[in-house]
Image (spheres, grey):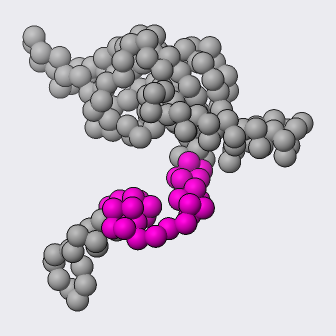
Amino acid sequence: MKNGGIFLSLSELCLSVAPRWLVSLLLGLSMPVAGLAALADEDLQRRYQAADMVSLVKVKYIGDLVNPAMSVHGLIAVEGYVYTAQLLQQWKGAEQRNFKIRVNLNDCHARLQLDSEYVVFGKQAKDYDFQSFSCDDLVPREQALALVEALNNVRDRQVAEHPKAGPAPI
C-alpha cells in the first residue's frame, strides 16, 4: 500500500501475509538454503517457547465443549472439543501418561481423529490440562515428520550441551 493507496499489489499482499520463504519461492526470488532453515528455526523456536507442552500424542477420546448459555431446548451449542490424549513422546513440559487438550472452534475448526497421532503445542489451562489456540499447533503425525526430526535434533543438541540439566527450552 504505497503512496496512501488502498490497493495492494500481488507482491505486497503476499509479503504482508505469507512467510518470506514462501513468497520467495512463489515469486522466483533466490534465497539461500540456510535462509530457509533459519526461518523455519525461528518459527519453531517461537512456537516452542510459547508452549508449555510439546508432545506427540494419540487421541483416545473426543468430547464436546458445550456452551449451556447458548444451548436451547433440543439444541446443543458446541464451542469446541476436549481430547483425551495418550503421551507417546515428550519434548517439553511435565510428562503425564494421559491428559486433556481443549480446542475451541474459534481457534481451530478441524476436528482431530480418534486413534490418530498428532504433534501438539499447548498452553497450560485452568480447567483442562492444556489448550491449543491454532490448527498450526495440532499437526498430524503424517505431516509432521520433519517437525518431529527437528524437535528431536533440538532435544539431542540441548542434552549434549547441558547433559546434567536435561532438555531446556530452545
Residue range of the region highlighted in magenta in the rendering: 17-46
Q: Is residue 78 magenta?
A: no
Q: Is residue 29 left or right of residue 144?
A: left
At 40% from the left and 66% from the top, the residue drawn is: 24
> Would you place residue 48 above or below residue 125 in this image?
below
Q: Is residue 22 magenta?
A: yes
Secondary structure mostly seen in the magenta stretch: helix
Seen as rendered, the residue at the extreme bottom is 3
> Would you place residue 157 above or below residue 58 in this image?
below
Q: Position of residue 123 (x, y in %)?
A: 52, 36
Task: Work out which quarter of the rendered image holds the N terminus and state it.
Answer: bottom left
Q: How many marks?
A: 0
| Residue 11 visible somewhere in the drawing | yes
Q: Position of residue 86 (x, y in %)?
A: 54, 14
Q: Is residue 46 left or right of residue 157?
A: left
Q: Position of residue 167 (x, y in %)?
A: 76, 37
At 58% from the left and 56% from the top, the residue drawn is: 37
At 53% from the left and 33% from the top, the residue drawn is: 145
Which of these two is toward me, 136 or 36?
36
The quadrant where residue 113 appears: top left
| Residue 39 visible somewhere in the drawing | no
Which of these two is toward me, 17 or 67?
17
Q: Position of residue 96 (x, y in %)?
A: 63, 18
Which of these two is toward me, 45 or 149?
149
Which of these two is toward me, 154 or 132?
154
Q: Is residue 49 left or right of residue 10?
A: right
At 41% from the left and 40% from the top, the residue drawn is: 136
